[in-house]
Amino acid sequence: MPVEYHPAPPPPGPRAGGLPHHAGLELDAIVALAADLELPNFARTVDALLGGSANFAVDREAATALLQLDPLADVRARAQRGFTRRVVRHALARGIDQFLDLGCGIPSVHSVHDVVLGRDPAARVAYVDLDPVVVAHARDLVADRPTVRVSWGDLRAPGCVAAAVGDHLDLSRPVALVIGGALQFVHDDLAAVLAGWRELLAPGSVLAATHGSTVSRDIAPTLDALYVRGLAGLSLRSPEQVREAFAVIAPAVDVVDWPSAGAGGRDTTGVLGVVGTID
């Protein structure tokens, strides 16, 4: 069974190669990548931090190493997931019944489709990720969910992603779009990327995004080394740079402080989030 591929140019950054950026890779080949237990995978490691089951021993070891570098890594992962859940509930309350999760990671713990389908079983969810390992795991996790689709795609290329999900979501109607935890791997101009999505979405849509801003330049190389099959390495940005990029949507806040101060907990995380409505 072929996986839907809508190729975009390979992401720029310090690491070249390692991932396919061409059409036509078969699902069996992706599953083989996912079954490589010698290397940790970032999305599986995040799943381990969240207490999920879609991870392997090598990923749990990486999670332990990550916590030694950043003792709040699991707190930040949970805070971002909590932010996403609140955004989804907000969109549902506005009557939105279509959800697009870009850079979705592995949807195993408190995922978008769990929240959405718990409120509206007829709603549609599209997951998109650039990592074929994520595509393989995610497709397996939602195989019994006919209203949930998983596609390969590059969030830097809105037109390509629209083609990937166009027969599942009606982009002429409002959509809730979430980009959670993926923008640290994007080296492009974030404001331009987000503006591209803002222009593509129909009026009434909700656009939400997060970006960590606390990774030390001293530990970033070690963190990168944990993921030799990473997409393109981390792109470090200061809180000021993230806020400036997010301003094309709305003012940014710590993810625990949306939609109101302390909504996701009393302790700030250093992960910035933004939520805006398309007019």
Image: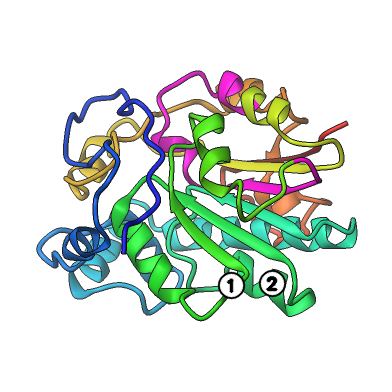
Per the image, is 103 magenta?
Answer: no
For residue 278, above or below residue 89: above
User: Which of the labelled discs sits on residue 115, or is there none?
Assistant: 2
| Residue that badge 1 annotates | 110
Q: Amino acid at mark 1?
A: His
Cβ atoms at labels 1 and 2 below 8 Å apart: yes
Say whether disc 1 or disc 2 marks the residue closer to the N-terminus. Answer: 1
Q: Residue at x 37, y 58 (%)?
A: 135
Q: Residue at x 42, y 31 (%)?
A: 186
Observer able to see residue 180: no
- Quarter of the image where one finds residue 158: top right
Span shown in magenta: 172-194
- Quarter of the image where one finds residue 236: top left
Q: Amino acid at mark 2?
A: Val
Percent of width and height locating residue 261: 81, 51
Q: Residue at x 56, y 25 (%)?
A: 193
Front-lying residue, 142 or 250: 142
Percent of width and height locating residue 159: 55, 30
